[in-house]
Image: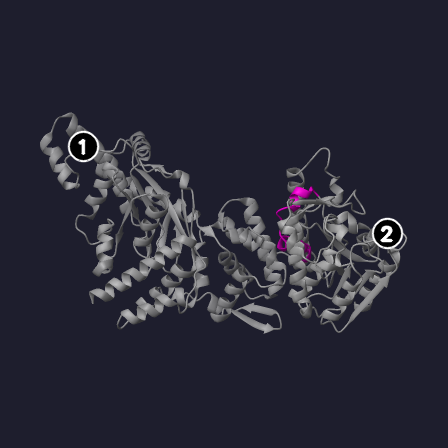
Amino acid sequence: MKDRLYDATQFIFSLVEKAMANSITFSGEEHLDKKVPTLFVANHFTRLETFLFPYILYKKLDFHVSSLADPSVFQGLLGEYLSAAGTVSTKDKDRNEKILGDLLTGRNSWMIYPEGSMIKSKKVLLDKDKFLVQTQTGLHEIFTGAAVLALKSEMLKIQYLEFQNNCDIENMQKFKEKYFLGDDEKISYYNTHIIPVNISYTPIGKGKNSLVDFANKYIDDISDKLNEEIDIESNLLLSSQFHLHFSKAIDVKDYLLKSKRALQKQEIDTDDESLIQKIKVPFINLMMDEVYKNILITFEHVFALSLEYLEEREFTLDELKRRIYLISRELKKSATYSVNMDLHANIYTLLNDEPHKKFDDVFALSIEENILENIEGDIYKVNTKNFKNEYTFHTIRIKNILRVLINETMILEELHSTIKHQIHKDLAAVNKEVFYTIYNRDKKEFKYDYNKFYSVLESKPKEVGEPFILYDEKNTIGCVISHGYKSGPKEIKPLAQYLFKHGINVYAVRLKGHGTMPEDLRDVTYKEWYDSFDVGYAALRGVSKKLYLCGFSTGGLLALLKASNVTEKVDGIICINSAISLQDIRVKYLVPTLNILNNFLSMFNADMDTYESEPEHPEINYKKHYLTSIGELKKLIDVVNERLQFVSEATFIIQGDNDPIVDPKSADMIYESIASSKKEKYVLHSDKHVITLAEDIREDFFEKIIEFIRDKS
């Protein structure tokens, strides 16, 4: 039996180490001070918190913290570990004295969960400035033990100092014995601090995993309650990110003195015991207000609350995604709450018609729990009966985890107001707002890059590199257009204007690293170029009944790649003078000093990392570029080659017959490789590469593009 317990304990802590290495984030660490006796108060959702988070605080932040734990966990080697780590059973008759001894001396800090037990439903209500939590026995007020201990720690310091000043050795010794103080230990000069801690998890998953299997192997006759806890908590340990937010410290002595003065002004008795009784409830509510309002808002919270306010309306997934996008932007802008990075970084990818793990996972969960019903096609409806079902205290985490997430936010009025407002907006207004929000963000990013790399002597005017839109809400057709390598949006402006003149809305993207200075392009990857194209796609998709992707040169490759990833989501592709093989790019365009480009890898052994080539339009294009950028161009070409077989949309390929940069055979390769049943190749006579700026020939193929779009629309 001992060997089995040893194996189990070692297995669990190996998982803890793994989780700590990958999934722990903090905020508010600046509020921690190891010199100060500290009482952490936190929300309580899982059993593992009682030993896991003190362990994390020690390993990650070098902060020694003890906690209370249910007596049932003090068994075998795990129990030995918990005792050695300073964890105390909630049934220990001396638990309060041990905690007070640590706070008096500052030798150790403590974490306490004032909710009293795990709040599996996360149901927290506010009633007349008092927090109520729901446990298996019903609603009850927050326990005041943490407030009482904190207040007593300051009162006892005063008492001990009086013994000391009066040289009362006998009472000093009794005091030390009662509170487990060593003979040489001294009372801390620092006031006790309260640090409210919010513990958040994302995502909260469930289902089979290695720890569940391990538990089934080592534990006989697992009850339903224990099985639920193992299921939820093992998935948290293995799959979730943990976030600990530390609020600003509350100085207990300062709070005590202010409260005492306020009562004295009212001529109310203020002896120690009566003072504690009068202020413990408002004090604990002050602490827990900091805990609850600093919940980390996650993607899952926003998804669940969006369903809450959609109620029984029918909606498409695309509509839901666009509303979630606007909610995330508004939350970031207001900065009222702590918001997970999943709602910040590249949230526009929610709208790009490609897999989005966060959305896909929580959507699948809502289907599994019968919260969402598919009406037909892409139209869904919330099953409000199932969604509002809270089941039982011990089953809600398994049967309706989205309701748990909603419960956690019930006191966050501004969050609910923000989400309700966005959910009730007119859909046409939502689509338009998404369009302009993405565009303004795109322009802001360009402005940042432009200023970062600005050179008085070398920078080109902003209009060369700034992304732009041509938009009329009466138009129903949209086109995302991209410029080529080393260039900027001005390169494709004549085409954009021509399309707009013929009733087609345009989003002209600026590929990352372009339109500023060559140094900006040096460390940019081809994936970031793709992301730039994706921005235009995400913006224009919601305001277009028909959507086309168009790109010049490298931009054409990005249009093909995007189309291969969103099969049947776009209505057509136009690629202009696009090279599908590095060998098809003429040497002088990239590295004039090399005679042969076939042996591409030999370039990486060269002494130089920058090269210069004279562009057709030096007022737009970079003259200098980096070897790393050429490497990224090759990666893009290789990826597009692999994906051409998945391009099934109608495609129009345009190529100049005497292109000085791209070998015309590249157009043939694209034509033959794509899977489109409707495809057309148009070869025009030109000895220029940038034919979008060639006034003598451009209107001819511009008109061909219009014909292609009209034919498919």
Which residue is drawn at the image coordinates 26% and 31% (left, top)?
A: 189
Question: In the depicted view, which residue is nearer to us: 152 or 137?
Answer: 152
SS at circle 1: helix
Quickly name the residue at label 1: 160
User: From the viewer's perspective, is the residue at label 2 or at label 1 nearer?
Assistant: 2
- The image quarter in which residue 354 lies: bottom right
Q: Amino acid at mark 1?
A: Tyr
Image x and y of residue 191, in percent:
29, 33
Q: Is residue 266 above or below residue 5?
A: above
Image x and y of residue 77, in percent:
22, 59
Is any part of residue 148 visible from this angle? yes
Left or right of residue 464: residue 646: left
Instruction: Provide the residue span drawn in magenta.
Output: 516-539
Is 45 inside the magenta-drawn segment? no
- The image quarter in which residue 647 lies: bottom right
Quarter of the image with the C terminus in it: bottom right
Image x and y of residue 610, in percent:
67, 44
Q: Residues within 10 Å of mark 2 (few under 14, many from 20)?
A: few
Question: In the depicted view, which residue is nearer to us: 135 or 242?
Answer: 242
Q: Indicate which disc, 2 or 1, sits on the residue closer to the N terminus.
A: 1
Q: CA distance from mark 2 to mark 1?
A: 90 Å
Is 520 inside the magenta-drawn segment? yes
Q: How is the image coloured?
A: one colour
